[in-house]
C-alpha cells in the first residue's frame, strides 16, 4: 500500500478512536473500552513509527491503565501531527449525500471541506461545556422557584 494512502487510513483510525474514547467517557464507558482504545492507539502508533521514525521523538505508547480522556487527547494530537501533510479530515465523500444536496452539491461540498474541522471543534466545545451549562441552568431554575415563592408574601413597606 502506498505510504500516503496508509497514513490517511491510520490517521482516520486515530480520529475515530479519539471520538469513540470521548463518547465512551461521557456515556460511562467501562475499563474494557479504555483498554481497547489504548491498545488501538498503541498499534497505530507502532505502525506510524515504522512508516515515519521521527514520530517516536514526539509520541510514546500509552500505559495500559490510561483513561479514555487520555486516549482521546493522545489520538487527536497524533492525528494533528500529520494534518499539515495530509490535510484536515474529509467528512464529505462524493455521492454520499446526493439525495439531499443534489442541486447544490458543489456548494455544500466546498463549505464542508472548508468548515468540517471547525464543526468538529465546536462539537467538542459543546460536549466539554454541557455539564457547566446544565449546572447553571439548574441553579437558575432553583433561583426562579425561590423568587416566585418569595413574591407570594406582601412586600415590606418599611412602616410598622
Image (tube, grey):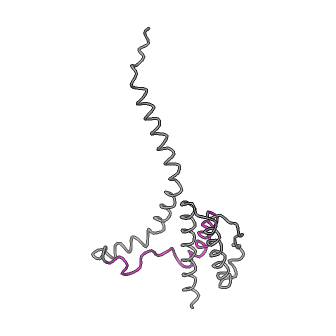
User: Picture quarter containing residue 58?
Assistant: bottom right
| Residue 101 in the image: above or below residue 159 | below
Q: Residue, x 72% and y 75% (percent of image)?
A: 57
Q: As drawn, which residue projects farthest toward the bottom?
A: 1
Q: Residue at x 70, y 82 (%)?
A: 53
The residue furthest top is 160
Place of residue 97 in the rendered image (x, y in percent of width and height, measured from the top left): 35, 76
Q: Which SS does the magenta portion mostly show?
A: helix
- Whole-percent x and y of residue 127? 51, 58
- What's the residue at 62%, 73% (across, down)? 36
Residue furthest out toward the left: 103
The number of callouts visible is 0
* Residue 62, x across and y down, in percent: 69, 70
Q: Quadrant of the C terminus?
A: top left
Q: Residue at x 57, y 91 (%)?
A: 1
Q: Is residue 92 above or below residue 131?
A: below
Residue 115 within the magenta-colored segment of the rendering: no
* Residue 87 lies in the magenta-colored region: yes
Can you give x and y, in whole percent of width and height, for residue 121 in the image?
50, 63
Task: Pick the residue in front: 75 or 119.
Answer: 75
Range shown magenta: 69-98
Depth check: give the residue in front, 107 or 9.
9
Amino acid at each position: 500500500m502506498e505510504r500516503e494512502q496508509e497514513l490517511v487510513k491510520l490517521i482516520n483510525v486515530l480520529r475515530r478512536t479519539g471520538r469513540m474514547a470521548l463518547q465512551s467517557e461521557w456515556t460511562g464507558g467501562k475499563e474494557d473500552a479504555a483498554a481497547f482504545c489504548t491498545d488501538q492507539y498503541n498499534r497505530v502508533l507502532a505502525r506510524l513509527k515504522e512508516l515515519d521514525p521521527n514520530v517516536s521523538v514526539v509520541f510514546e505508547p500509552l500505559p495500559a491503565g490510561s483513561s479514555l480522556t487520555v486516549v482521546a487527547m493522545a489520538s487527536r494530537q497524533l492525528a494533528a501531527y500529520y494534518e499539515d501533510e495530509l490535510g484536515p479530515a474529509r467528512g464529505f465523500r462524493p455521492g454520499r449525500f446526493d439525495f439531499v444536496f443534489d442541486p447544490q452539491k458543489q456548494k455544500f461540498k466546498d463549505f464542508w471541506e472548508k468548515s468540517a474541522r471547525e464543526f468538529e471543534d465546536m462539537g467538542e466545545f459543546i460536549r466539554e461545556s454541557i455539564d457547566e451549562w446544565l449546572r447553571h441552568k439548574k441553579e437558575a431554575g432553583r433561583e426562579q422557584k425561590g423568587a416566585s415563592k418569595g413574591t407570594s408574601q406582601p412586600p415590606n413597606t418599611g412602616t410598622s
